[in-house]
Amino acid sequence: MTKTLEIHLKSAEGLKLNRRPLKKKTHAVVKIDEKERTSEPDESRVSNPTWNHKLEMPINGNVQFIYIEVFYRTRSGQNKSVGEAKIPTSDFMGKYSPEGHLNCLSYRLRDEFGDKCGIVNFSILVKSDPKAVSDTGLWRPRSDTPSIDGYGGRIVTGVPVWGLYQRPY
């Protein structure tokens, strides 16, 4: 089933290149399968760039990760990678995450050696085809107001008690 992701690339924090603050023009690239979209470059030349770029991309249900990669532009005009964030789709499309919910996320950027080189901030909104009817499992719109007749008309609050009844090993 194909859905649409509305991705808002907001900013990055603490960008580093060879453990030094990066003060060059930067832009971000979102990759889903073989499709990719690029943000406008940030002209401020600071290590905390701001893009505020919105884009929409289709995504299949079998995609497990999306990638956000940050690049900087060299003096000769080449684009070089600062780092990449690998985002599991289960973080915003899992069965516990409802469609139409805005997910504000921050992920660590890693360079080609796996070293930390900054943080990328973005938000994702999952949109589905309004014509397609699907059963999402846990999140269903209610057709009527919930009934409290079974509890004698009182409000009941549930509290999880996970650690109280563990079996000794």
Image: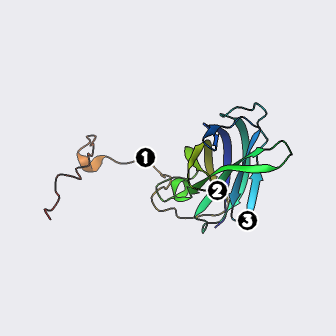
Q: Position of residue 128 (x, y in %)?
A: 64, 57
Q: How far apart in space, not on screen, are marks 2 and 3 (Cα)? A: 11 Å
Residue type (three-letter) at the residue carrying disc 2: Tyr
Q: Furthest residue to the right?
A: 76
SS for dot 1? loop
State the residue at coordinates (60%, 69%).
Answer: 62
Q: Considering only vertical position in the picture, is 23 above or below 152? A: above
Residue 32 lies in quadrant: bottom right
The image quarter in which residue 156 lies: top left
Q: Secondary structure at mark 3?
A: loop
Q: Which residue is mark 3?
A: 34
Crowdedness of circle 2 by 10 Å Cα count: few (<14), some, many (20+)?
some
The residue that mark 1 highlights is 145
Residue reaching furthest left? Answer: 168
User: As displayed, is residue 109 above or below residue 49?
Assistant: below
Nearer to the camera, 169 or 153: 169
Name the spot of residue 119 as percent of width and height, x first: 58, 42
N-term-proximal mark, 1 vs 3: 3
Q: Residue at x 62, y 52 (%)?
A: 111
